[in-house]
Amino acid sequence: MPTNTMKAIRLHEFGGPEVLRYEEAPVLELKPGEVLVRVQAIGVNPPDWYLRDGYKALPPEMRPSVPLPVIPGSDVSGVVEAVAEDVQGFSVGDEVFGMIRFPSYGKSDAYAEYVAAPASDLARKPAGIDHMRAAGAPMSGLTAWQFLIDLGHDEPNPLQPERHRPVPLGGKTVLVNGAAGGVGHIAVQLAKWQGAHVIAVASGTQESFLRELGADQFIDYAKSLPEDVAHDVDLVLDTLGGPTTGRFLRTLRRGGALFPVFPGFSDAEEAAKLGVTVSMTQVRSNGPQLAEFGRLLDAGTVRVAIDSTFPLADARRAHERAARGHIQGKIVLTCSDLQL
């Protein structure tokens, strides 16, 4: 068992990567339904820097209140150190991975040597992959899964009145924008697994990487606008989203679907004229879904690419790497001497 303190990254103020402080923090006590995980690796995701900068991209009235100090992060892979008395299915020594309490706005506490996680958010780590790749899997994998395969819950959708509904992919043409990133490179593989013809959009340096993952066609956005090249697409998954996502309406056949991962779509009237369904959702923690996804990872059907790794103490450098963009797969923090 650990002592009552651990090393962690904490925020005492909001701002740039320089506000990430590596310091002593208390180990949280287990509550009913929780598992204490000795963390081996931590996945770095966009919500980590949204929290770090105080959600400044949101209008002030929409920014969640986050008490300081706070530990960022949500994705971990590690070893079970202790279990609450009411927890079944996990034992001390089990290797597990998960996306912890997401969405919770500062209550996931993953950038740390230990995390107290709801057992329902965890799954057994696939034996065929290491902790670094397991830590890179949860948020990206669950986002792609819940958008493309199965939503897996009946919680209200904070992004639209309707429940998000994935569409059958077998025999369809699927375009993935931002295909080399964390969500994108997994979405390419899941769409191929489901029998889709996949068009990947990314920078030219990523072409060989994405073709290795199964992309049937590749569009270098620096040379050609995807909306000028792709036509009669059944589904666009735009992992970048935002106010420019409406341009992909031009690529879709009548009756097709556009799934932006990030908000900003504002062309609802044009979409209705074209008979295009535009739908979004917010990814949520889901241990059983992660276990299903883990079986694909274990079999090698889907793999998690690692862009770069940094020790936990160097979380600032990890966030600086993320800010430079053109990420191939996932950025991961390590709490031990793990090697690629």
Image (cartoon, grey):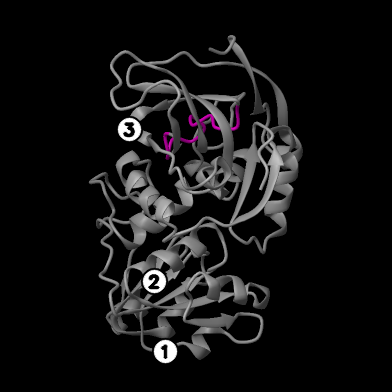
Q: Nearer the viewer, residue 197 or 237?
A: 197
Q: Is residue 18 left or right of residue 293?
A: right
* Residue at image mark 3: 120
Q: Which residues are magenta?
A: 101-112
Q: Residue at x 53, y 12 (%)?
A: 1
Q: Amino acid at mark 2?
A: Lys
Q: Is residue 232 above or below residue 276?
A: below
Secondary structure of residue under mark 2: helix
Q: Residue at x 48, y 49 (%)?
A: 137
Q: 10 Å neighbourhood of mark 3: few (<14), some, or many (≥20)?
A: some
Q: Is residue 327 left or right of residue 118?
A: right
Callout 1 touching callout 3 (CB < 8 Å): no
Residue mark closest to the camera, 1 vs 3 = 3
Q: Amino acid at mark 3?
A: Ser
Q: Nearer the viewer, residue 127 or 142?
A: 127
User: Residue 297's spot in the image, x, y percent?
Assistant: 43, 53
| Residue 18, image quadrant | top right
* Residue at image mark 2: 192
Mark 3–mark 2 distance (CA, rounded to whole Å): 29 Å
Residue mark closest to the camera, 3 vs 2 = 2
